[in-house]
Image (tube, rainbow, N blue to C red):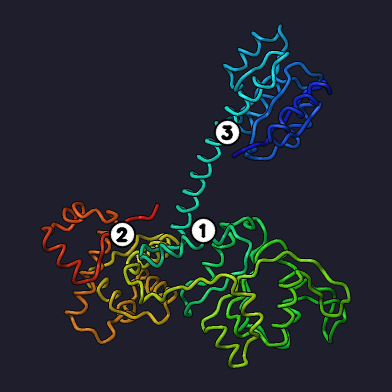
Amino acid sequence: MLNSVMVVDDEASIRTAVEQWLSLSGFSVQLFARAEDCLAQLPAHFPGVVISDVRMPGMDGLQLLERLHTQDAELPVILLTGHGDVPMAVEAMRTGAYDFLEKPFTPQHLLGSLRRALDKRQLVLDNRALHQQADLKERLQATLLGMSPGLQQLRRQVLELAAVPVNVLIRGETGSGKERVARCLHDFGPRADKPFVALNCAAIPEALFEAELFGHESGAFTGAQGKRVGKLEYANGGTVFLDEIESMPLAQQAKLLRVIQEQKLERLGANQSISVDLRIIAATKPDLLEEARAGRFREDLAYRLNVAELRLAPLRERREDIPLLFEHFVRGTAQRLGRDAAPVSGALLAQLLAHDWPGNVRELANAAERHALGLDSAQHAVAPAGQSLGEQMEAFEAQCLRAALRLHQGEIKAVMEALQLPRRTLNEKMQRHGLLREDFIEAP
């Protein structure tokens, strides 16, 4: 329940009395003698109510009401009026004031009006939160494409973890989209307006690793001309994405562990520690704990990085997402080149579904780009991996069923009409392909 109240009145005795009444009733009260001070400290989406006198020097209560509603049109404002101000207060209610109380008023009258205003504010903020969550889900669906159960679960996990200040370990095969997921964890969280710094640990020579991460002072080593800010310091306040973390040298793993534990680092050649506020997102293909048991990775760092883990399924385990992704990449390439998107034939779609995609989404994107360019190699690149025509047709049929079930969110009657299939035939095909309508009903 909301309990925040801002009280604006130039009379100290009124402020004191109102604060005593409200504090005894469990409210959190802020007092202001001037309307300008209240405006300066009003946070966005203030979780409470403003109570203001009408007649005050400088900005009066009606001007304050107008300014408050410029920032938030649904913020409840209760006006305190003298006897001669009642007609003016009634007019103010027509223009947006929640209520007015004529002085002198009783504590019961004030508390009753305040509680009703807070109930209304709660509904408004709850509604905004629902709309914001729906907007985030829609944006995330457009970023992490796919309607397979695994992708839907991944999006839910990303939204949950984006708002939580914990380190995350992303596991997945090469080309499965680990950096895109890391970027979503950053972009959909409170650090979105701060730096996102991506670093591929396998691409940095071991001799340069420490300077790259931690920076250096002038003269710290041969060739160190001038001060250099490292990647970790540059990302202060934001997120560091460490791809292929299993490739990090053991010596640097120890230093990274200290940064995570203490939120401090030292540049090479410096004696002074620098405080940093970082979220670490690491990505790996192998199991870090197995790497630790083999002596190739620090076990304590593995646990520090793996506060939460996200597993990205390879593309071969979510084949129903292949047509959507392929068409998305084809459209993107065509738009970039200023040409019409090349159609995707049924035969090509069958080939796409039959291929195992060892390079995952990255390989699929390359195949889509070649298709958009009209290159013959596109068909050859996705040739079926030893599958018979019957097996390819089965895969294509399963995809058509999944696409229709997904489009109509498991509504069997609508799927029957879309595919022009009788109920019994649809049931048999769904059973043969292991499809359940419940899996295609969008979670609330």
Q: Residue at x 62, y 16 (%)?
A: 92
- Rounded to the nearest whole Å, what is the CA distance between mark 2 and mark 1? 20 Å
For residue 440, above or below residue 55:
below
Question: Under tag 3, what secondary structure?
Answer: helix
Q: In front: 379, or 251?
A: 251
Residue 134 falls left or right of residue 234: left
**Quarter occupied by residue 361:** bottom left
For residue 86, above or below residue 20:
above
**Quarter occupied by residue 193:** bottom right
- Find disc 1 in the rendering and name its residue: 159
- Find disc 3 in the rendering and name its residue: 121
- Find disc 2 in the rendering and name its residue: 440
Q: Residue at x 22, y 71 (%)?
A: 433
User: Residue 182: x percent and y percent?
Assistant: 56, 67
Q: Could you tell which of marks 2 and 1 lies nearer the N-terminus?
A: 1
User: Residue 41: x percent and y percent?
Assistant: 75, 37
User: Residue 192: x percent and y percent?
Assistant: 62, 57
Placement of the N terminus among the 4 image quadrants: top right
Residue 236 falls left or right of residue 176: right
For residue 58, above or below residue 140:
above
Q: In front: 52, or 140?
A: 52
Instruction: Please give the label number shown on residue 98.
Output: none
User: Residue 157: x percent and y percent?
Assistant: 49, 63
For the residues bearing labels 3 and 1, Cβ distance under 8 angstroms: no
